[in-house]
Amino acid sequence: MDYKIGDIVEFKKQHPCGSKTWEITRVGVDFKFKCQDCLHVITVERQKALKMIKKKLESTED
């Protein structure tokens, strides 16, 4: 699946704050995600990030 900056995705496991929804803020060798509830930011290597994502909820259209 193709991911872009600004897409909202759902993770398989929830964050300690209770949210499963994250916004993608960087795509490349690493993915950077921002939690939609507590605004916590994480950076994850690409292979691990693709396994963490359950589905894309919203996408940004150009």
Image (tube, rainbow, N blue to C red):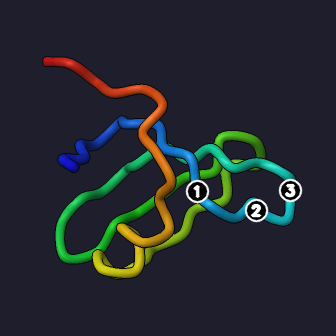
Q: Amino acid at mark 2?
A: His
Verify CB contact (< 8 Å) between mark 1 and mark 2.
yes
| Residue at the left extreme, as displayed | 62
Q: Amino acid at mark 3?
A: Cys
In the image, which disc is placed on residue 17? 3
Crowd around label 1: few <14 · some 14–19 · many ≥20 (10 Å): some
In the image, which disc is placed on residue 34? none
Residue name at image x 25 percent, y 47 percent: 3
Quadrant occupied by the C terminus: top left
Q: Secondary structure at mark 2?
A: loop
- Would residue 25 be found to the left or right of residue 35 on screen? left
* Residue that badge 1 annotates: 11
Verify CB contact (< 8 Å) between mark 3 and mark 2.
yes
* Residue that badge 2 annotates: 15
Residue name at image x 43 percent, y 26 percent: 58
The answer to whether 54 is drawn above or below residue 51 in the figure is: above
Q: Amino acid at mark 1?
A: Phe
Residue 47, x across and y down, in percent: 30, 80
